[in-house]
Image (cartoon, helix red, strand yellow):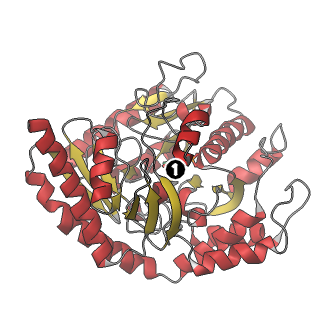
Amino acid sequence: MNLINRDRASLWHPYAPASPTLPLWEVEEASGVTLRLKDDDGARHEVVDAMSSWWSAIHGYRHPTLDDAARRQLSRFSHVMFGGLTHEPAVELAERLLAMAPADPSHAPLGRVFLADSGSVSVEVALKLAVQYQSAVGRPRRQRILSIRGGYHGDTTGAMSVCDPLDGMHATFAGLLSHNVFAPRPPGAATATPEGIGAWRDAVDGLARIHSDELAAIIVEPVLQGAGGMFVYPSECVRALREIADRHGLLLILDEIATGFGRTGELFAANHAGIVPDILCVGKALTGGYLTLAAMLCNDEIARTVSAGGAGALLHGPTFMANPLACAIANASLGLIGDGGWRHDVRRIGAGLANGLARAAAYDGVADVRTIGAVGVVELERAVDVPALTRAAIRRGVWIRPFRNLVYTMPPYICTDADVATIAEGMLGAIAEMHAEVRA
Ligand SMILES: *Cc1c(COP(=O)(O)O)cnc(C)c1O
């Protein structure tokens, strides 16, 4: 049996049935922005990775600096428990994250880091911290979260409970998920008016007021909702949430697991709004896509209050917390970010995508084309045939993974202009081919 058939006989894939017909490609090698794939029939394909392995491999594959960091840490130790022990990679990572986190003199700076093993877990920790904080300040009834429709915060049950209620499959898991409060989605960046933003702000403020006795925090993905729809909205709305949180005694949790480390054109999406959250979650690109690692940052006041509260501790502690290998690679990745070259690259890639994808706006069946930072999105009027579109893109030398009606790219920052052109052409060609088939 070939590898793909052995996979089909034994594994689950993300959001997939256990299926003998699931289309799969074997990755034989990856370097730079290139994936070398083998298909079912043994045919090989070289493709530009337009997904950065779900938005994480921002420096590309086998980057010499990250490879070196991994090798160096491997020769010291790969993992030790974090209870009662510490190590240089974790301390350095905390210091680096705090130094680069959004800051603004009018709000308490982020001063404390909890290292978690995935983005979803960092969201769980953020939600638990918010509830523990409210309890510690004498508001133990505040245990619900205000979330925004269209959001995505992860696949564990706490995180799912703040995802969009439809997308998050709340009906399927009704008895398992806690019941949170959902505000409408903000107006889209392209069509928002001052009146529209004002009306949205008033609606969210009204919800926060009605439920203020039971709400611990607001959670939101600033400026770009990712897996919930690749939806871009004005930074004024993020500023409004900062004010609403302050007015009603709620903590503001920014989920920057997708948007952190330059993806939207600022180091953090919060920087577009010029605000500081009380709690910040980062993940995905943190290790440059090498290993799973995420972090939750909070301000000193929250850390002090929770530590002095009834429990006397933040009640969380994963086995693989602060994995040294992952931390060492994250430090190397943040070192590359620290060079500042990402800003030019993200702008250059964004311009290339805006230019390369613009033509799709005139296509039959395309509802919208939008870009922000190094993100390019073509929204179709109907759900895409994922296997067929994937094949059509691979034939054009591009790896994409569309979902619902969205064909999008978040390429590695090391993409050349030629790579960006290949990605845009591949996306448009695949979309055009699909629609030709639909019409035939
Ligand atoms: C991917 C993602 C998560 C979940 O992170 P995992 O590492 O997959 O658990 C949470 N929030 C946002 C905004 C994400 O994009």
Work out whether residue 422 or residue 407 is closer to the camera in this orientation and state it.
Answer: 422
In the displayed structure, 326 sits above or below 11; it is below
- Residue 71 visible in rendering: yes
Left or right: where 227 falls relative to 118? left
Residue receiving disc 1: 255
* Residue found 39% across the figure and 41% down from its top: 228
Left or right: where 310 falls relative to 436? right
Numbered circles on residues, count: 1
* Residue found 35% across the figure and 66% down from its top: 374
- Which part of the image, by quadrant, shows the N terminus? top right
Work out whether residue 194 or residue 8 is closer to the camera in this orientation and state it.
Answer: 8
At which x and y percent is residue 310? Answer: 83, 37
Question: Does mark 1's beta carbon lie closer than 8 Å to ligand 1?
Answer: yes
The answer to which quarter of the image holds residue 178 is top right
From this viewpoint, which residue is outermost toward the top?
175
At which x and y percent is residue 411? Answer: 39, 64
In the displayed structure, 152 sits above or below 340; it is above
* Residue found 61% across the figure and 20% down from its top: 176
Instruction: Indicate the amino acid at tag 1.
Output: Asp
For label 1, the crowd category at 10 Å Cα-Cα, with few meaning under 14, some 14 to 19 and many 20 or more, is many
Work out whether residue 83 or residue 11 is closer to the camera in this orientation and state it.
Answer: 11
In the displayed structure, 269 sits above or below 314; it is below
* Residue found 54% across the figure and 37% down from its top: 8
From this viewpoint, which residue is outermost toward the right?
84
At which x and y percent is residue 124? Answer: 64, 40
- Which part of the image, by quadrant, shows the C terminus? top left
At which x and y percent is residue 153? Answer: 51, 42
- Residue 233 visible in rendering: no
Q: Secondary structure at mark 1?
A: strand
